Amino acid sequence: MAAGVTAAHSSPLADAAEELYALPLAEFTAARNDRDKRARAEGDPELARQIRLMTKPSAVAWAVNLLVRDPDAELDQFLSLGESLRAARDNLDRDSIRDLAAQRRTLVSTLARRALGIADRIGHPLSAAATREIEQTLESALADSAAAAAVTSGRLVRALSSVGFDPVDLSDAVAAPDLPPVAGRWEARHSRSGDHPESRDGTARVGTALTPAKTPKREVEKARRELEDAEGRAEDAAAELDALSRRIDVLARKRETLTAELDALKSTASGLEAELRVLDREASGLGRQRSESSRAAAQAKRAVARAADRLDELT
């Protein structure tokens, strides 16, 4: 059995996941392919399929996965701080939020440096930019209980980020999300005490998700108001979309009419231009004929004058 996974959590898929996401990053793909081949050779195509779905983690996610497997990382304190911060936020307890903020900055910075140190010792040093991404991932775990579960799963495949009080986007963030989290010091603590691993805000960790043990009425009312607001915004957006669609249809029909009229005008203009060219050619020919006639008339007039003079001389 892979180290760090309790017997209660052991399964072929869990064993494979624990092995893969605890490996040095450069060894992940080859080890996953080997696990896939072994499962198919042993006649377990479903296990092979699930193993193939395990995504190679980003360098930042890999470092976080190493961190949550480190027994000296003191993640109990980190998880407890997250529970306290979320409780203070939900209760709008500004004094507690302010008091806990300094602890949050210090602890996040300490854990991020520890993750970088672990990666460096394994021979895969990370860039300075990775420090901020690790810090953002840890900050997300403090802000959102579901993100905390994703981080402590030990199978994170990408960095996380949070925006205000919005839920953290966890789509495709965890490999084999139905498996329980990697066994760590926080789990060992609860196992020794015999208590169910329940957080201070009354939520119990199940797999990689947190299930509310009891939802206060205030939170239910808040959720209902948020739903009503969301439905109102959705209705307004739908109405605006419908109005815009109708306007677009009107403009499209008007454009079709104008296009047809323009085509007709272009056709008429083309015919008129052809007639104009014919008239220009005829006018040019008549102009030449007029010039010739004018010269002939002048010549005839001069001949008449000469004939009249001659007649006068003879008479």
Image (cartoon, rainbow, N blue to C red):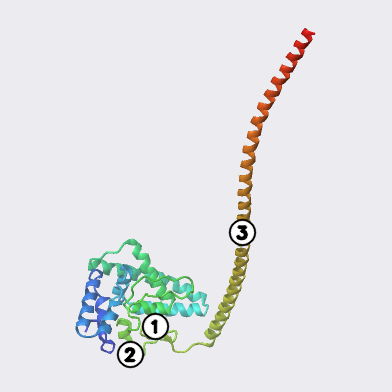
Residue 294 is situated, as x and y percent measured from the top left of the image, at 69, 25
- Marks 2/1: CA–CA distance: 22 Å
Q: CB under 8 Å between callouts 2 and 1? A: no
Foreground residue, 251 or 166? 251
For label 1, count other residues whose C-alpha is less than 10 Å away and answer few (under 14), some (14-19) or many (20+).
many
For label 2, count other residues whose C-alpha is less than 10 Å away and answer few (under 14), some (14-19) or many (20+).
few
Foreground residue, 264 or 238? 264
Where is mark 3, residue-wise? Answer: 260
Q: Is residue 18 left or right of residue 132?
A: left
Element carrying mark 1: strand
Residue 10 against residue 113 in the figure, above or below: below
Residue 58 against residue 18 in the figure, above or below: above
Element carrying mark 3: helix
Residue 36 is situated, as x and y percent measured from the top left of the image, at 23, 78
Residue 54 is situated, as x and y percent measured from the top left of the image, at 30, 76
- Marks 2/3: CA–CA distance: 83 Å
**Which quadrant would residue 149 be assigned to in this image?**
bottom left
Q: Amino acid at mark 2?
A: Ser
Disc assigned to residue 209: 1
N-terminal of the pair, mark 2 or mark 1, is 2
**Which quadrant would residue 297 be assigned to in this image?**
top right
Q: Amino acid at mark 3?
A: Ala
Question: Residue at point 65% right, 26% down?
Answer: 292
Q: Amino acid at mark 1?
A: Ala
Residue 172 is situated, as x and y percent measured from the top left of the image, at 37, 75
Foreground residue, 46 or 136? 46
Where is mark 2, residue-wise? Answer: 193
